[in-house]
Image: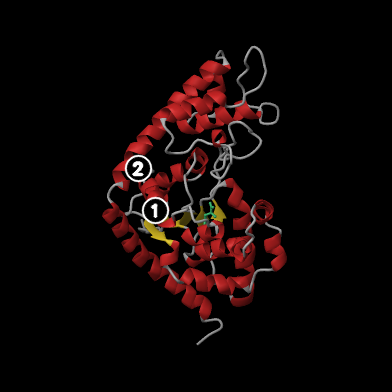
Amino acid sequence: MKNVKCKKKILFSAVQPTGFLTLANYLGVLKHWKDFQNKYSCIFCIANLHSLTNLNTSINIKKNILDTLAFYLACGVNPSKSIIFIQSDINEHCKMNWILNCFSYFGELTRMTQFKDKSKKNKNVNMGLLNYPILMMSDILLYNSNYVSIGDDQKQHLELTKVVAKRFNNLYGKVFSIPKNIVFDRGSRIMSLCDPVKKMSKSDSNEKNSIFLLDSRKNISEKIKCAITDSDNPSKIFYDKKNKPGVSNLLNIFSILTNNTILESEKLFFDYDYYSFKKKLSDIVCNELCKLQDRYFYFRKNEKDLLDILCIGAKQASIIAKKTLKLVEKQFFF
Ligand code: TRP
């Protein structure tokens, strides 16, 4: 038999180092990275250039970079298996960004939902906010990514990445790999606890809506206790996103954390009332997050090791980014 050596496909992902990560970031994105490492060649970036779009003087991005890296490690990202790097360490992102600017249309960017939302909410509608998806495209395309792991709210940016990459390839030949989204069979969209038709977000003004990865046991239990369910009496625990968004959201969180299907979770809670359902769920969430926090503090305390990991990652990322950018520039420049 022929011995065919399969090259692993490339998976890219990134998180912005802005403030605290939430349970939604964890369940939708970070929790899956550990296992991806066995299947793909993984590249995990800390998107600090993106976080400049939403800067205020109370945000300490340098500290947040190390916090974010410690979370990556706590979630099981292994620097001897995967490349981990800071976006701003690789200058090629900015040059690629400029080139891709010239292949993206103004109308495409003003149509992006995130841009529309942020320009309504923010006082500071800077050019970075409009350009944001093109910088994301540059991240993804520089590393020939076959797969991209993203939260639900970033899907539109990935779709635009595909459109622009194909547009470029139609003109210049197969320069870019066209990336695919990693799709989960189970809902990755975690909703706000008190307003379950809105997504859980780290920038929510009401802290009770989101569980942060560093919340204490007490805080987590209180937030889950206050989560909105509905007025069904007696309690009825089943999944119905439209008519029971609160209960469905809690069932979804339970099923992702315990690897049960929604159906299995519904069966488990068949004769529970909302109070004991929430009690059980908060035990599960607390146990998972407490273990995560222990690992987080273990990695976070040694800054020298964290900086070393980023330094090695930057060297590895640089080799790939330089090669791709050269291939792009070859089309236009000496
Ligand atoms: N914008 C993403 C977020 O806020 C982070 C990000 C930046 C990203 N560049 C990326 C995600 C490239 C995937 C691929 O979640």
Residue 320, numbered label: none
Amino acid, disc 1:
Lys
Of badges 1 and 2, the one in the foreground is: 1
Q: In this view, does 99 lie above or below 241?
A: below
Q: Name the one closer to the observer, 163 or 227.
A: 227
Q: How many labels does the image show?
A: 2
291 relative to 260 in the view: left or right: left
Q: Is residue 327 above or below residue 214?
A: below
Residue 217 sits in which quadrant? top left
Rendered location of residue 268, percent (x, y): 52, 19
Percent x, y of residue 79 = 33, 54
Element under label 2?
helix
Please tell me which residue is depicted at 56% across the width and 13% down the height of the picture.
271
Amino acid type of disc 2?
Answer: Tyr
Q: Mark 2 points at which residue?
A: 296
Q: Where is residue 188 in the image (x, y as percent from the top left)?
A: 56, 40
Q: Can residue 44 be seen in this view?
A: no
Name the residue rendered at 31%, 58% in the picture. 307
The tag earlier along the polypeptide, 1 or 2, is: 1
Q: Which residue lies furthest to the bottom in this view?
A: 334
* Numbered mark located on residue 63 in the image: 1
Mark 1 element type: helix
* Whole-percent x, y for residue 114 in the image: 64, 53
Which residue is located at x 54 percent, y 68 percent?
Answer: 176
Label 2, residues with CA under 10 Å away: few <14, some 14-19, many ≥20: many
